[in-house]
Image: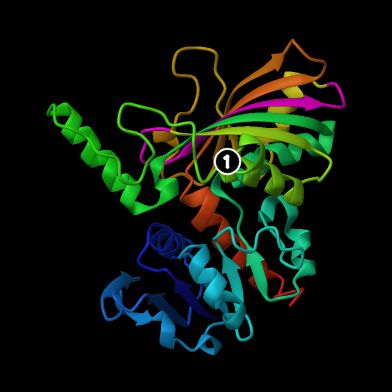
Amino acid sequence: MNIAIVGATGNVGRKILEVLERKELSIDNLYLIASSKSAGSKIKFRGQEHEILDLDNFDFSKAKITFFAAGGNISEKFAEKASKNSMIIDNSSFFRMDPDVPLIVPQVNSEDLNKIKKNIIANPNCSTAQLVIALKPLHDLFKIKRVVTSTYQSVSGGGKAPMDELIEQTKLILNNKKVESKNFTKQIAFNVIPHIDEFSDGGYTKEELKMANETKKILDNKINITSTCVRIPVLVSHAESVNIEFEKSFTLEEIKEALDNFEGCKVVDNRFDGGYTTPIEAEGKNETFISRIREDKTIKNGLNLWIVSDNLLRGAALNAVEIAETLIKNNFYGK
């Protein structure tokens, strides 16, 4: 099995390497690819140093599977060309709504891998990935009508530069120095910003529309969903406050059992101080944690959840590697 990673020096690329190393997949040859400015540098994997290769000159026929983790512009320019010789798993938003490209969370809709037409598989937005993995078992049992979600998204969702800026802003403020925002529309340290990605029609941001459109594509086009996406001064892990309206009645015991028995979910729901999961506890963990499970008494068949997950893992690297594992397990069915 020969594997390539485009964007190997970035946040998600390095996290894919961590996941691959931890899972101990059998890899014959590993190709780490980045822009020309990073070419020639080295990254260690499984005790060996691997030289970074120049994207412009890489021969994709060398790799059976290629992870793209370098952003939409790179995927737009290189992914379709690469897909003629390699199976592409793309972490950007570029192909997500392409009707010929399956958008996959393996625990939720792995059967859609049968619909591969371009040798490209899309990885969903990080906030969508953790949401659908919690919604899936509940939708199967009680049929979701509507979802209202407010997200509390860490700065790592924007890449390494926003993470560095949060740290720098925090230092400056603690030393009573002036802050200038570079990667945010307003100061992020000691603040929250109700704005992620560009504004679109109707006042929604692209991030908010991604959550709605991707959830429909992955789970069920009939689900109504609306979101407000907020950036918070946390380095890693996204949290979501989720309100769900079902068609069928439920008990909280049924909800908890369904979630706890679903692959990738873990219920931490204790009604005492600290009996819930926060972003810090989720960091570095594979699971999507569900807490604050309670009925919404204001609507029929209503439920409230608090969902937390490591966005670099669940929403990006881990999901991408699990897609690859599913392909390998099924001998690339659908190709």
Q: Position of residue 34 (x, y in %)?
A: 38, 74
Magenta stretch contains residue 236: yes
Q: Is residue 244 left or right of residue 180?
A: right
Q: How is the image coloured?
A: rainbow
The part of the chain drawn in magenta is 232-249
Residue 264 in sight from this viewpoint: no
Q: Position of residue 201 (x, y in %)?
A: 65, 42
Between 175 and 67, which is closer to the camera in this rendering? 175
User: Can you tell which quarter of the image residue 304 is in?
Assistant: top right
Look at the image and tell me in which quarter the C terminus lies. bottom right
Between 186 and 155, which is closer to the camera in this rendering? 186
User: Can you tell which quarter of the image residue 307 is in?
Assistant: top right
- Identify the residue at horizontal 71%, vertical 47% (top origin): 213
Between 23 and 31, which is closer to the camera in this rendering? 31
Q: Is residue 310 above or below residue 16?
A: above
Residue type, mark 1 in image: Thr
> Total number of numbered labels?
1
Q: Position of residue 253 (x, y in %)?
A: 73, 21
Q: Residue furthest right?
A: 248
Between 201 and 61, which is closer to the camera in this rendering? 201
Q: Residues within 10 Å of mark 1 (few under 14, many from 20)?
A: some
Look at the image and tell me in which quarter the N terminus lies. bottom right
- Identify the residue at horizontal 63%, vertical 39% (top origin): 131
Q: Is residue 308 left or right of residue 161?
A: right
Magenta stretch contains residue 119: no
Q: Is residue 188 above or below residue 93?
A: above
- Identify the residue at horizontal 85%, vertical 21% (top origin): 249
Callout 1 secondary element: loop
- Identify the residue at horizontal 65%, vertical 43% (top origin): 209
Q: Position of residue 292 (x, y in %)?
A: 58, 20
Residue 247 in sight from this viewpoint: yes
Which residue is denoted by mark 1 in the rendering? 205
